[in-house]
Amino acid sequence: MRLKLASYNIRKAVGLDRRRDPARILTVLNGIGADVVMLQEADLRLGARPAAIPRFLIAQETDYEVVDLSVNDVSLGWHGNAVLLRRGLEPQSVKRIDLPGLEPRGAVQVDVAGLTLVGAHLGLMRRYRLLQMTAIREHLRGHEARTFIAGDFNEWSDIRGYEPWETEFRLVLPGRSYHAARPFVALDGFAYGAGLTIAQMGVERSGPARVASDHLPIWAELERR
């Protein structure tokens, strides 16, 4: 079985031209053609955290359905983490994962097609990122083999800063994804268990992806062993 997954920090759908353009984000996602999309910063930060992309627009312009992760009627996800599944894929279970830190953070879990998928947007400070990685690892205890973690990990080094995941997961950084105008660091990545392999992966750099957000989306084609 092979699934294509994408991860994208959409910066609340505000592009480098300072325009909030949800339709442009959906154009990027349609171009990638993933089966599962993990979004970060999918909700606004103030008030009830309304969705940055209206649900009706997702239904109208894509083949995706929004996984029910929100705790209210206006957000797409939880702590800005949202998951879109291509129609026909059904989640077996969904969970919200509390993460420690100075700033409010969380991760989301969706079990689908025999896989445990986790979307995360980790903190800005390494000391808290390490605590958050540890919390995710402990939450997944016993289910590591078929777990796939994706998101904006906010780590500027590609050789350290991922120590809590080094034993149970393999970390891969598909390429430089930030800043979209001139990518120089791989802030976005994947971590996965021993029961999975990545056949292909990459960074989407074409067309509207260069201006739709300050991050470029990353993707991977995932296979179960």
Image (cartoon, rainbow, N blue to C red):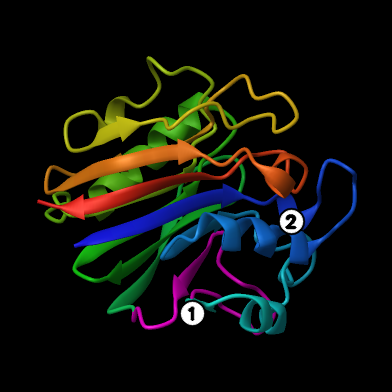
Q: Residue at x 13, y 42 (%)?
A: 194
Where is residue 111? Give x, y as percent. Answer: 28, 69
Amino acid on which disc 2 is placed: Lys
Where is residue 223? Give x, y as percent. Answer: 21, 52
Where is residue 104? Give x, y as percent. Answer: 59, 51
Within 10 Å of the Cα at label 1, are there few (<14), some (14-19), or many (20+) other Cα atoms?
Answer: some
Which quadrant is home to the N terminus? Answer: bottom left
Residue 73 belongs to the span the image colors magenta: yes
Q: Write down the quadrant of residue 130 in the picture.
A: top left
Q: Is residue 166 left or right of residue 34?
A: left
Q: Which residues are magenta?
A: 68-90
Q: Write down the quadrant of residue 72 in the picture.
A: bottom right
Residue closest to the eye, 62 or 121: 62
Residue 119 belongs to the span the image colors magenta: no
Q: Is residue 61 left or right of residue 35?
A: right
Q: Is residue 117 left or right of residue 223?
A: right
Amino acid on which disc 1 is placed: Asp
* Numbered badge on residue 124: none
* Numbered badge on residue 12: 2
The answer to whether 86 is drawn above or below residue 100 in the figure is: below
Q: Residue at x 41, y 65 (%)?
A: 35
Q: Check disc 2 and report its element: helix, strand or loop.
A: helix
Residue closest to the eye, 155 or 63: 63
Within 10 Å of the Cα at label 2, are there few (<14), some (14-19), or many (20+) other Cα atoms?
Answer: many
Label 1 sits on residue: 68
